[in-house]
Image (tube, rainbow, N blue to C red):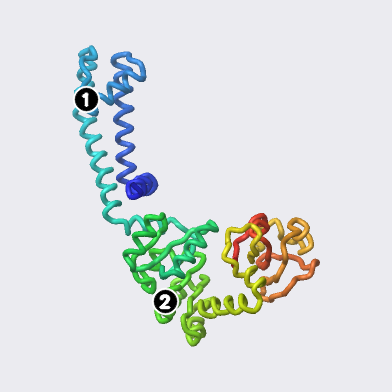
């Protein structure tokens, strides 16, 4: 059932010229037939439309008492109209069949329409977690992997997943790397992640790249390969376990497993753009609008970082604020969460 629904959605959303021509042709034939019977026979709109459909579908519900002129028009409609509708139906069926038999083309077409999205390379446990986390927060994602079982399952859930090698230029281009906001190289192989970083950086020099490092010795190599940020799951997980052992309440606040709790702590970033209502205002002004938010740091557009910015700190275009608060408080500000 889900496959049929996804096929129908794809048919309705992925308009190609053949589908457009087919639907326009069907509509034109039906309108032509209805208008002709209204003019020749003087029938009502509904009766003319109904008889046109009866003619085109070759149902034949009996004698409608046509005049000789009406019979000639009906004959023309039978020959030309039925041929036109048959052609249109063939085109639609062929398009639907192609979508069903070539899901990869459908995925690529959907990815081609996206911009400012996030590309996840590798769909192991980490990659799937990243993808689901971004989806929950409303970000568009395109994933790349070669495991057919994982690909099929995630496609059924509605995710856009491409089948291929994430280090291959053609695959990254199909995923829209030149239009994407960020790339995550999160396979379980550091060498593969390094190749993904190199390829993505070459194709999109300004894109943000986050890489996963299994070994500590790979962290610097991944940075040299083009990664903007390198994260070691073993370090991150180990730090969390250590915190929970010696500072359990702090760990529960920072690493608590109840991520849907509105009172859990969230860190987020707020970018000051030309259209931002906070442009030119101070931290004090911002805080007055959101008194429950804590201002952790401010990074200016020249790269300088200020911890705990002063109330008089003026927000300029290009500045980025790191803030903290409960899930609900962060949502009220309307920013992207960084960590739970």
Distance from Cα at disc 1 to Cα at disc 2: 61 Å
Q: Residue at x 35, y 62 (%)?
A: 151
Depth order, front residue of 75/189: 189
Position in image of residue 27 (x %, y %):
33, 32
Label 1: element kind: loop
Q: Position of residue 235 (x, y in %)?
A: 54, 80
**With 126 as the anchor, is 305 left or right in this view?**
right
Label 1, on which residue? 59
| Residue at position x 21%, y 30% in the image | 80
In the image shown, does 133 or 14 lie closer to the viewer? Answer: 133
- Numbered circle sitting on residue 118: none
Left or right, 46 with reference to 245: left
Q: Are marks 1 and 2 in contact (CB under 8 Å)?
A: no
Residue 159 in picture, x, y percent from top left: 42, 58
Q: Which is more N-terminal, label 2 or label 1?
A: 1
Q: Tell which tag, 1 or 2, sits nearer the viewer.
A: 2
Spot occupied by residue 10 in the image (x, y as percentages of width and height): 36, 49
Q: Which corner quadrant of the image does residue 30 belong to?
A: top left
- Mark carried by residue 188: 2
Residue 16 can be seen in this image: no
Quick check: can you spot residue 62?
yes
Q: Residue placed farthest to the right in the image?
A: 312
Q: Residues within 10 Å of mark 1 (few under 14, many from 20)?
A: few
**Which of the image's four quarters has the C terminus?**
bottom right
């Amino acid at each position: 059932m889900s496959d049929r629904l996804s096929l129908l959605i794809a048919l309705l959303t992925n308009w190609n010229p053949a589908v457009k021509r087919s639907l326009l042709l069907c509509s034109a034939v039906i309108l032509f037939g209805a208008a002709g019977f209204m003019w020749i026979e003087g029938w009502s709109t509904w009766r003319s439309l109904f008889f046109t459909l009866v003619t085109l579908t070759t149902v034949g519900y009996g004698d409608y008492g046509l005049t000789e002129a009406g019979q000639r028009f009906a004959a023309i409609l039978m020959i030309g109209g039925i041929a036109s509708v048959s052609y249109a139906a063939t085109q639609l069926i062929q398009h639907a069949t192609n979508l069903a038999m070539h899901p990869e083309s459908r995925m690529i077409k959907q990815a081609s329409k996206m911009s400012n999205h996030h590309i996840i390379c590798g769909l192991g446990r980490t990659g799937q977690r990243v993808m689901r986390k971004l989806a929950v927060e409303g970000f568009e994602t395109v994933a790349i992997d070669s495991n057919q079982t994982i690909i099929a399952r995630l496609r059924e859930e509605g995710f856009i997943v491409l089948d291929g090698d994430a280090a291959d230029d053609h695959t990254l281009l199909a995923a829209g790397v030149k239009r994407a906001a960020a790339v995550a190289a999160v396979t379980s192989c550091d060498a593969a992640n390094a190749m993904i970083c190199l390829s993505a950086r070459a194709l999109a020099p300004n894109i943000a790249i986050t890489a996963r490092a299994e070994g500590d010795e790979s962290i610097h190599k991944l940075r040299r390969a083009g990664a903007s940020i390198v994260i070691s799951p073993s370090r991150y997980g180990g730090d969390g376990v250590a915190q929970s052992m010696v500072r359990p309440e702090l760990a529960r606040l920072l690493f608590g497993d109840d991520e849907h709790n509105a009172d859990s702590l969230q860190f987020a970033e707020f970018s000051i753009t030309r259209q931002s209502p906070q442009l030119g205002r101070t931290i004090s002004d911002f805080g007055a609008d959101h008194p429950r938010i804590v201002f952790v740091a401010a990074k200016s557009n020249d790269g300088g970082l200020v911890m705990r910015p002063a109330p008089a700190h003026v927000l300029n275009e290009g500045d980025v604020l790191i803030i903290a608060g409960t899930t609900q408080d962060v949502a009220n500000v309307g920013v992207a969460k960084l960590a739970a």
